[in-house]
Image: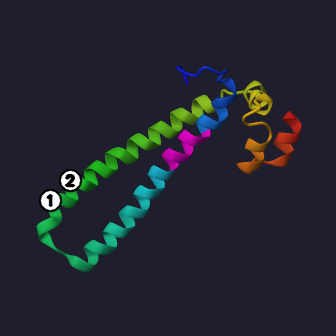
Amino acid sequence: MKGSHYLTLSLTVPLYNIFIDHVEDVIDNDNKEDKEDEEENDEENNNENDEENDGDEKWNQIVKKAAKKCKVKLLEYYNKTNDTYLISTIMDPRLKLKYYKDHNWEETLVNTIY
């Protein structure tokens, strides 16, 4: 955002949504991988890969923990945004009201702001 030649206040809400969605994907994918790994380990019971799996598991837990903390911090700052951010997104000719409609925001919220 720093190097942008355009005003960036209107991009705040969309960027927060992108970041939060990405972090949630990391958390959700990690949960899915954990379940798949458990199923594979139950089927294989192969001791050769135990050390490698333990290293991967530790790494996955570190990433998952970091992603959860990241989500908390992003939501903390996201909740500090006010109607000014939402209005600036609507006023931006690149985004307009279409952004909120495309991303399934509640119509009552959009109509209140608009």
Work out which quarter of the rendered image holds the N terminus and state it.
top right
For the residue carrying disc 1, how many other residues have a C-alpha within 10 Å: few (<14), some (14-19), or many (20+)? Answer: few
Residue 20 x/y as whole percent: 55, 42
Pick the residue in front: 64 or 94: 94
**Residue visible at 25% across and 55% down?**
56
Query: Could you tell whether 60 is left or right of 53 in the image?
Result: right
Q: Nearer the viewer, residue 113 or 64?
A: 113
**Residue shown at the point (61%, 20%) measured from the top left:** 5
The 10 Å Cα crowd at callout 2, few under 14, some 14 to 19, many 20 or more, is few
The spot of residue 99 in percent (x, y) is 73, 42
* Res. 7 image quadrant: top right
Residue in view at x 73 percent, y 37 percent: 95
What are the residue bounds of the magenta stretch?
A: 17-24
The label number, if any, that marks residue 87 in the structure image: none
SS label for mark 1: helix
Task: State which quadrant residue 74 falls in.
Answer: top right
Q: Which residue is mark 1?
A: 51
Instruction: Point out the residue furthest to the left here.
Output: 48
The answer to whether 5 appears left or right of 72 in the picture is right
Q: Residue at x 36, y 62 (%)?
A: 34
Mark 2 near mark 1, Cβ–Cβ under 8 Å? yes
Report the residue marked by disc 2: 55
Distance from disc 2 to disc 1, alpha carbons, whole Å, reads 6 Å
Q: Amino acid at mark 2?
A: Gly
Q: Amino acid at mark 1?
A: Glu
Mark count: 2
